[in-house]
Image: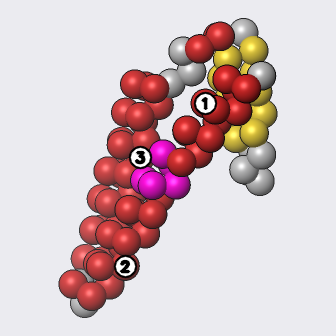
Amino acid sequence: MEDIFEAYKSMENSTKKIHSKLELDISELEVEVDCSIQWIEAAIYLILECLSELKEYILSEGFKKNNRQFRFSDSRNLILLQS
């Protein structure tokens, strides 16, 4: 059971880092870009980059141990699925 929580904490820490980086990048955009359409396009690009980074992390670290997967509900609660 400890493995599950360690994996969860590791994934949670990594996703928090990715999210924090995205927030920082978007806040820097507010200073750099004056035009709202350009800002939206740049923000979408940053979000897509962030999602790609998250996907790469999940694919590399993934759910390899014990055939278990984590699924997060809308309220960010952890749900463990065992296959």
Q: CA distance from mark 3 to mark 1?
A: 20 Å
Location of mark 3 (residue): 51
Residue 61 tag number:
none
Name the spot of residue 5 as percent of width and height, x first: 70, 33
For label 2, the crowd category at 10 Å Cα-Cα, with few meaning under 14, some 14 to 19 and many 20 or more, is few
Side (left or right) of 72 relative to 34 = right
Name the spot of residue 75 as percent of width and height, x first: 77, 53
Q: CA distance from mark 1 to mark 2?
A: 30 Å
For label 1, the SS is: helix
Side (left or right) of 51 relative to 46 = right
Which numbered disc, 1 or 2, marks the residue closer to the eye?
A: 1
Circle 3/circle 1 CB separation < 8 Å:
no
Residue type at mark 2 is Ser
Location of mark 1 (residue): 7
**In the rendered image, the vertical position of residue 19 relative to residue 67, given as above or below:** below
User: Hey, which quadrant is residue 37 in on the image?
Assistant: bottom left
For the N terminus, the image quarter is top right
What residue range appears in magenta? 14-18
Residue type at mark 1 is Ala
Residue 27 tag number:
2
Mark 1 or mark 2: which comes first in sequence?
1
User: Hey, which quadrant is residue 83 in on the image?
Assistant: top right
